[in-house]
Amino acid sequence: MYLSFYITDVQNKLVFQYLLGATAPSFKHLWTRVQSACPQLLEDSGSDNYLDQAMVGKDLEVYKYFSVTNKLNYWCLASTSKSKGPLDCFSFLETIDCILLEYFDKDKLSIKKLVNNYDRISLIFNCCIEAGEPNVNDFLYVNKIKEAVPERSDLSKFISSTAHNLQQAVQLPQQRQQQLQQNQMSRGNISIAEDEEIVPWRTSKASKHENNELYVDLLESFHVVLEKKKSRLRLVNGDIRGAVDVRSYLNDNPLVSVRLNTMGNEIGIPSLHDCVEINDDGEFTPSNIKFIPPDGKFRLMEYSIDLNSQLQKSGIRMNSIGMISVHFQNGLGKDSDEFELSLNIESSKKVSQIEDLKLDLQFNIEDAGESDVAYKVKILRNTHGRFENSVTMGQGQWIFDKATPTGTIPVLRGCIEYESVQPNSTRNIDLHTVSLDYSYMGQSASGISVEAIDILSGLTIGRNTKLYKGAKYKTKTGDFQVRL
């Protein structure tokens, strides 16, 4: 049973809290308990540590879910139950994160957005939770939440209308009040008949958009570990994780078809939104995805591509994963203490620039004379960006500008500079691991693309209403590492 929910920033400063009962503790009291009972939850969240849980008292557990998209921590205090596992709590917190994104129609939630909409977020939690448990009805569909928690403009109109009706009720005679109530009930019955929903995930009220719009975003992140063997790279482990997001602002109740070209990639068993139609035989074909879309932003599909099996199947080249290939050498220079790192950023007609490119460099040391050697990296040549030595010895970052043009070959050359030298000590310090972080717009890492977006039926386009549709692609790195 859930007792309370909290949202904090990455420094664990409170942004929002929802207490289900008078006995539920505030975040200040919970934080004091966490510090003493389970300090491991205080560690910084990251891509490798976005789920955590601990006992904070007898029959009490606290769960922490880190949203990589929003850079927020979601906390939940719950009583232990044999029928409820930790994955249920984590799944619910992840669902809440997605619901807030879809409700506000945002790609990322800001703290200011949450603070300014504290009342509406409280109402959203109230819709999603019933008697301390997730609401099993259709309230987890965003359109149902939007009907129960309207936009601020609609909410103000509702309040104004209610106040006006109350004023009329006070002023009108009793007989007139009864007649007015009968008329309202009659109109309400007609409205219910007119607003009968076609599907539970689409609002029962007829959508009225000035223009009919449908946009498809294909997002992919690739997670790769490559090992350098002589002059070649070998795939140790790798996968591509993809998602198809849709923004739909269509009138009526249209049937939509999105056709994907998978380029021969095996996408496994994808996770699909309830709106997706499945064939009678239970098979799903990504080449023709049919659905009646919810109104607004939603996630149509998530999929995963195992690069290990793809490599065995099609002989995929290592340099074709992403748009940047990495090459580095050690033991250069007359004293064999220099290294050189070069990147080959492929040219592309679809991608004009690489965004937020950053490399983390890790050096190893094999020392026969002493265990601790003080040194730092000295840069001899740098064609792009800047290099920063870390406060931790043996680490550094090569940081590029916000945008780096494609079709370039950045080069970084440096040497090891010792701060103290002991006689008769031999050292061998090499560049051992390079980790990349970047993103780009215009194409997917796997090559999957949207071939067509069609409105099959159910959409009437008026004389002054236009239809807009389109697709865009974004690729980013997850864990991308090249090592000796």
Image (tube, rainbow, N blue to C red):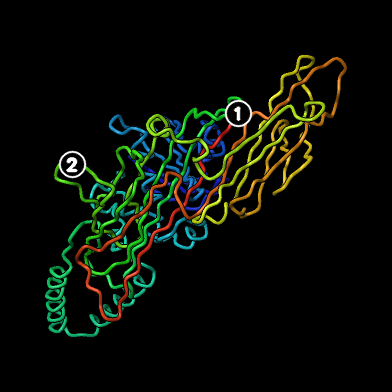
Q: Quadrant of the N terminus?
A: top left
| Relative horizontal placement of residue 343, taking residue 277 as reference (left or right) | right
State the residue at coordinates (66%, 40%). Answer: 342
Q: Which mark is residue 231?
A: 1
SS at badge 1: loop
Q: Position of residue 89 (x, y in %)?
A: 36, 39
**Which residue is identified by label 2?**
282
Contact (CB < 8 A) between labels 1 and 2? Answer: no
State the residue at coordinates (47%, 40%). Answer: 222
Q: Position of residue 174 (x, y in %)?
A: 15, 82
Q: Nearer the viewer, mark 1 or mark 2?
A: 1
| Relative horizontal placement of residue 461, taking residue 224 as reference (left or right) | left
Q: Position of residue 149 (x, y in %)?
A: 33, 62
Query: Which residue type does callout 1 highlight?
Result: Ser
Count residues near mark 1 (Cα–Cα under 10 Å), then give few for <14, some for 14-19, many for 20+. Answer: few
Task: Look at the image and tell me whether residue 280 can be seen.
Answer: yes
Query: Which residue type does callout 2 highlight?
Result: Gly
Task: Estimate the spatial distance between the alpha carbons at disc 1 and disc 2, rounded to whole Å.
Answer: 47 Å
State the residue at coordinates (37%, 57%). Answer: 216
Which residue reaches farthest right? 423
| Relative horizontal placement of residue 417, taking residue 84 as reference (left or right) | right
